[in-house]
Image (tube, helix red, strand yellow):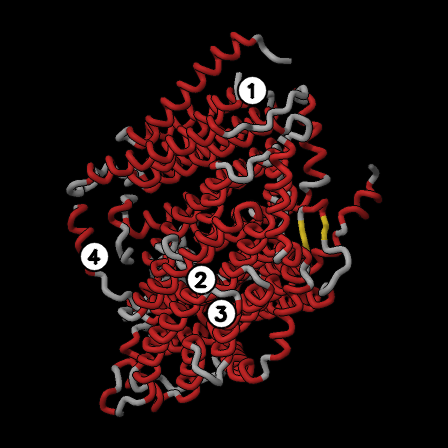
Amino acid sequence: MDFATLAAQLNAGTIVPEGIVIVTILLVIVGDLIVGRSVSARWTPYLAIGGLLLAVLALYQRWDSTSPISFFGEFNADNLSVVFRGIIALSAAGTILMSIRYVEQSGTSLAEFLTILLTAVLGGMFLAGSDELVSVYVSLETLSISSYLLTGYTKRDPRSNEAALKYLLIGASSSAIFLYGASLLYGLSGGETRLSAISAGIATAGLDQSIGLVIALVFAIAGIAFKIAAVPFHQWTPDVYEGSPTPVVAFLSVGSKAAGFALAIRLLVTAFPLVTEQWQFVMTALAILSMVLGNVVALAQTSMKRLLAYSSIGQAGFIMIGLVIGTDAGYASMVFYLMIYLFMNLGAFTCIILFTLRTGTDQISEYSGLYQKDPLLTLALSICLLSLGGIPPLAGFFGKLYLFWAGWQAGAYPLVLLGLVTSVISIYYYIRVVKMMVVKEPQEMSDSVKNYPAIRWDLQGMRPLQVGLVMTLVATTIAGILSNPLFTLANNSVTQTPMLQAAQKPAVQVSKDETVRLPIAL
Amino acid sequence: MNLAEGVQIVSFGILAVMMLGSAFGVVLLGNVVYSAFLLAGVFISMSGLYLLLNADFVAAAQILIYVGAVNVLILFAIMLVNKRQDFVMVPRIWIRQVATALVCVGIFALLGTMVVTTPWAIVTTMPVGDASIVKIGLHFFSDFLLPFELASMLLLMALIGAVVLARREFLPEATLEPGDADALTLPERPRELLTTGRSDSTIQ
Amino acid sequence: MQLQYFLLIAAALFCIGIYGLITSRNAVRVLMSIELMLNAVNLNLMAFSNYLDADEIKGQVFTIFVITIAAAEAAVGLAIVLAIYRNRDTVDMEQFNLLKW
């Protein structure tokens, strides 16, 4: 096998978007080394955003690619992975917009922050398309290790240190558990590491109902549930959200979570088709726990970041409804909700960062009366929170509607009813914040708001924040009414993905065939 | 090149006892320095087990990376953070330890049952043995090329990140104004530091 | 020599790792417990590679990746432990309670 045939077999064109991200990382590092920290802070963030947008453009060109499988089956660039990689890249672009001023204020250097963030994006993008255990593990760890570093990036702050330590210890142990499950898969399938070959190998070995497969499934789910912060693997979430720099939290709650869902779909559908009922049962339990616990505990929070932490746990529960029903509409509604969640959650975090930068606090009570001092911020935060709660004309409503509709179609009535009840609860705590900002009389204003500084957008790093704020605000508002393109995109990404189509209804027949065939073989 | 059966079993037994014994020492001993040295024992006996499994390259890599790098790193970390301090006793900690031990025994029983009852599809082909390094190289540059290259980005980022976090920031003391004391912290104010105060008083 | 022997001691090592992970109070020792768990996984992979996949030895390749990443993780973990030690002057897990669990 000479070099030319090897290069042709690799089909490396599928990872051009990731290549663009890598080039951006190297440019940021080298550029920062050459020109020095103070000068580079002026252009590196824009270079990084440019690189990410270019990567999204390259992804768009790879939509519907005829030969998605590349690197000898390591990477599968099907349409589903394209959508997820796009979500991850966009979430990082939004994060960079809001992080410029914040990182400046915390007195740490921006170029290293961008490097680590972009590497996290790289890991997430590879994770969304990885089709083989080794590359799943390596990309998962790329994402995780960069997330630990980002969490502890403000190293002078004990809260940030502590969040990073907790995140690292829980994350590393959950990835060790995940890895044990992966090693069992390798053994049970008789030495296969490609996800699609694993289930075939296990079926050939006649181990499709063995206890080993169930243990591998449980261990793998432990790793996935940690990434998407599903109860009972959520313990790190509130602490990490509260202690780490807020832009990092924005990325973790959107980009990292989307990568986790991409992994969940690919791993569960491709590697565990033999135990579909079991994994759907486990994920249903996790969805119920997440919806109930996330939304109920959020009621008692006093810190805005913690509130959003628990709300994101609840949101993960809603998204899992789409996963467990396992229909086309279910997966499409997951993708659709994640796209909308990208805008509204990034918008909410942009508002929190803006408020923090101006007042230095993130207590919910300090927001009272904000309307009199800063109408734009109040409007943006209200819209994003109401959209997260699912109030009708906004984007979040349509996302939830589609999720619940898909669940109802598939006959998951209890799950949908529980989703409805908990989203009503969630509306209560979102409205509480909105009410506090809008309807308080001037004399009830909090101290922070009373001392609110004059609004200035011309400071360094404020302009990108403003751009991010307005863009997410507009997207959250109109994505609801003009949701058709997103809707079509989500649907196409599912219906044109061979992996999911193969796993649809025929899957039941396939597994039946297996059980019929096996006794004959024995 | 397999060793004779009897020698294999005896060396397996010795290595297994060594490894499990050191592993218990790592988690149970009071002094963390002993734990770190016993961890090296675990790594070395693990490498011996790899030799029994016909994997000479990985056995060498295990010694070089785990004993040579990871363990030395851990020892350095212990040197840097080891303050002779007795941890404050937490009441009823033994209940937690016993409960954890029971859970771990339960997990072991589950995994053990699984290992014993599963009919593994053992193949009878001759292991590649000495040619393993060639085989591994071929894998790295054909079907495992993507993770191989991604690992290089991961290592680069881990290097940069670890340096950023572990480096001491030398703030020029003279220019440090009173308000700049927390210049490198999160822009949010800490919520309440009551717990810090309590823990500080218990240390000293 | 049987595959099951190796798998059993790997399982034992994994459980020892879990025990150390939950009960250790020194942050450095928690990191060591995680290394134990990763080593257990490696032993699993190597055993499978020898007995079930003797031609392709993909398990050995997997193990090398795990070793690489474990080293990176250890470096990052110890950097974080150093950072927290500078600020809090302790590595006792029970003292890290600025944030509620």
The answer to whether marks 1 and 2 sit on the same chain is no
Mark 4 vs mark 3: in front: 3
Q: Chain of mark 2?
A: A
Q: Residue at x 62, y 51 (%)?
A: A509
**What label sits on residue B195 in the rendered view?**
4
Q: Residue at x 64, y 13 (%)?
A: B1
- Is A315 positioned to the left or the right of A363 in the image? right
**Dot 1: within a 10 Å radius of its alpha carbon, few (fewer than 14), some, or many (20 or more) residues?**
some
The image shows residue A385 at horizontal and vertical percentages of 41, 78
How many angstroms separate mark 1 from mark 3 (CA)?
56 Å
**Which quadrant does the C terminus of chain A fall into?**
top right
Dot 3: what SS? Answer: helix
Camera-side residue of B135 and A223: A223
Instruction: Please state which amino acid type lies under the numbered disc 4.
Output: Thr
Q: Is residue C77 above or below residue A52?
A: above
Q: Residue at x 57, y 8 (%)?
A: B4
Q: Chain of mark 4?
A: B
**What label sits on residue A408 in the rendered view?**
3
Dot 1: what SS? Answer: helix
Mark 1 vs mark 3: in front: 3
The answer to whether marks 4 and 3 sit on the same chain is no
The image shows residue C38 at horizontal and vertical percentages of 47, 36
Dot 2: what SS? Answer: loop
Mark 3 vs mark 2: in front: 3
Do the residues under discs 4 and 3 have CB atoms within 8 angstroms? no
**Which quadrant does the N terminus of chain A fall into?**
top right
Mark 1 vs mark 4: in front: 1
The image shows residue A10 at horizontal and vertical percentages of 76, 47
- Residue identifier under label 2: A108
Instruction: Please state which amino acid type lies under the numbered disc 1.
Output: Leu
- Residue identifier under label 1: B51
How many angstroms separate mark 1 from mark 2 (CA)?
47 Å
